[in-house]
Image (cartoon, rainbow, N blue to C red):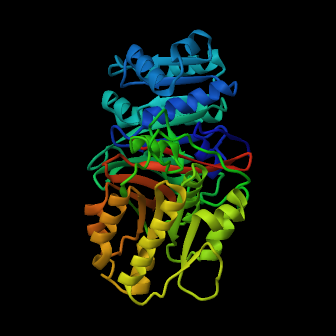
Amino acid sequence: MSFISTGVDALDKATGGFLKGSSILVRGAPGTGKTVFSTQFLVKGVKLGEPGVYTTFTEPKAFFFENLSRHLGVDLERLEDEGKLKLLDMTSLSGGGVSILLDSIIDAVESLNAKRLVIDSFSALANVVKEPSEVRELIHTVIGRIVRGMDCTSIIVMEKAADGLSHDIEEFVADTVIVLRKRFMEDRVLREMEILKMRGAGVAHPLILFTLHGGFQAFLPYMEEGPREPLGFKPVKPKTGFLSTGIEDLDGILGGGLPPRSYNTLEVGSKVSLPLLRILRPMMLHALNLGHSVLLLPPMGISAAQCKESLVPYIGVDVLNNRVRIVDFGPEIREPYCLRLEGSKIKSDFWQIWKTLEELRNATRRSVLSIIGFDTVDYVYGLDEGLKVLGLDLSTIRNAGDIRVNLARPSARIKAQLKDASDNYLVLDEVHGALIFYGLKPRTNLYNLDISYRDGILESKLIQII
């Protein structure tokens, strides 16, 4: 069996591509991205030397070229002029035109030696061709003569109304069935595709998130890839007066990064599989790189020793001992970087944290970045204990001109109070295995957090879901 690219990199990676010479049914409600997906399938074919034909019953040619060219960043009209793509405008087709339609499609495929075909949409065609027998004849001719006989991989688009299918997909046989959906998460647009079946391929991830931002881009579940630890650190140039979050796109959303006197919270969903040090380390490294100090009360599951091992390759032992303090509740570590707390009385322990912040600030004459895992606070001191120090903690950070990033879990009882107190409240969650990032303060759309390695260097970026 031979496979061809779907036009979507993540879908190719997940499935291996579409079976060459197969039929693909793509269905969904209006506005779910069917036309973008199908056009990108053809454009990818052109790039691979596989000409394509697009048959549309819904959008006039000029409108199609203008909108899709802008969306995909490619000149579709030029591709047609070069004989690499053919658009058949069937918007004016009336009853009785089935034979003309079939002849037009077959002629276009033969003249172009097309290897890819899109019919958009079966639902619109069925509204024109009233006789069900003629519709079935058309579909079977396309699948039998064009798909199988001419080895032309074909997508058939089908509308799905909000209250259900307008036509039964079992009326014809498709090798692959993909459903596109748009739903809402926290009142924000979320898009997902479901692979109901795919002949010739095992489907490990039947539900995949995607965006229509800059085309059709899908997001696979996050999995640790590349080196276990990055080989280097790529600084992000911060806006003057700000500390970087370590993610340039996030800095832009926040107006430049994290300013002095700011109190910020990151809520991390219980399903998130990303090791939190992957998020925290770039933030800490950027602060240390600019001469600031860092205090860290690690979230649950991360020890002081692990934090040390994560930072030393980038900053060295001297910087760690002089400008980093990591909270630990055990007696085992007796090193300069370790701030040992008793873990019995929250007020006295936080007084020790505030005193240490002052010492670090005086030593560098710069603001201090402190990161506090409130899940650890809950576990060590008991539920609701954090409320006893929240007000004084907030005023201490603001009065001193420091920068705070709190970490919270969805189950934390103090979450509502942290949201009220925070200048920025951000959420990191996981949907169908993909990392989803969004802001409650400031309010943002949903983003996919993409983490990859380039030449051993870890890079993070946010891709908007629209």
| Residue 28 sits above or below residue 413 on the image | above
- Residue 132 percent coordinates (x, y): 36, 37
**Direction top: furthest residue:** 81
Q: Residue at the location (54% across, 50% down)?
A: 246
Q: Residue at the location (57% across, 47% down)?
A: 175
- Residue 403 percent coordinates (x, y): 42, 57
| Residue 313 sits above or below residue 378 on the image | above
- Residue 16 percent coordinates (x, y): 67, 48
Does the image show residue 154?
yes
| Residue 104 sits above or below residue 29 on the image | above
Quadrant of the image occupied by residue 229: bottom right
Q: Is residue 368 left or right of residue 160?
A: right
Number of labels in the image equals 0
Which of the two residues, 217 or 309, is positioned nearer the viewer here?
A: 309
Q: Residue at the location (31% across, 59% down)?
A: 422
| Residue 321 sits above or below residue 237 on the image | below
Which of the two residues, 343 or 274, is positioned nearer the viewer here?
A: 343
Q: Is residue 371 left or right of residue 113?
A: left
- Residue 445 percent coordinates (x, y): 35, 46
Q: Is residue 39 left or right of residue 121?
A: right
Placement of the C terminus among the 4 image quadrants: top left
Which of the two residues, 35 or 197, is positioned nearer the viewer here?
A: 35
Does the image show residue 139?
no
Which of the two residues, 450 or 184, is positioned nearer the viewer here?
A: 450
